[in-house]
Image (spheres, rainbow, N blue to C red):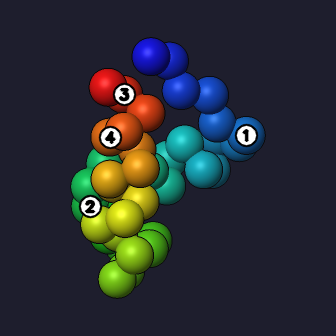
């Protein structure tokens, strides 16, 4: 599945696990889970 992002900034924000953790802190696990659901 191809993901489309509203902006390049958002795409970079969720590009890797470390970027997710840095930008979302305690919510990082949920953000990564949502991102993973979209790929499967």
Task: Say whether disc 4 or disc 2 marks the residue closer to the N-terminus.
Answer: 2
| Cα–Cα gap, marks 4 and 2 | 15 Å
- The 10 Å Cα crowd at callout 1, few under 14, some 14 to 19, many 20 or more, is few
Query: What secondary structure is found at the residue carrying circle 3?
Result: helix
- Residue 29 spot, x, y in % from top left: 29, 66
Dividing the picture into quadrants, the one containing residue 30 is bottom left
- The 10 Å Cα crowd at callout 4, few under 14, some 14 to 19, many 20 or more, is few
- The 10 Å Cα crowd at callout 3, few under 14, some 14 to 19, many 20 or more, is few
Indicate whether 8 appears above or below 32: above
> Does residue 20 show up?
yes
Q: Report which residue position mark 2 lands on.
A: 18
Split into 4 quadrants, where in the image is the N terminus?
Answer: top left
Q: Determine contact: label 4, label 3, CB under 8 Å.
A: yes
> Does residue 15 show up?
no
| Cα–Cα gap, marks 3 and 2 | 18 Å
Residue at screen point 32% across, 25% down: 40
């Amino acid at each position: 599945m191809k993901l489309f992002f509203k902006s390049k900034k958002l795409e970079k924000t969720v590009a890797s696990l470390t970027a997710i953790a840095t930008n979302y802190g305690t919510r990082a696990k949920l953000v990564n889970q949502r991102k993973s659901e979209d790929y499967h």
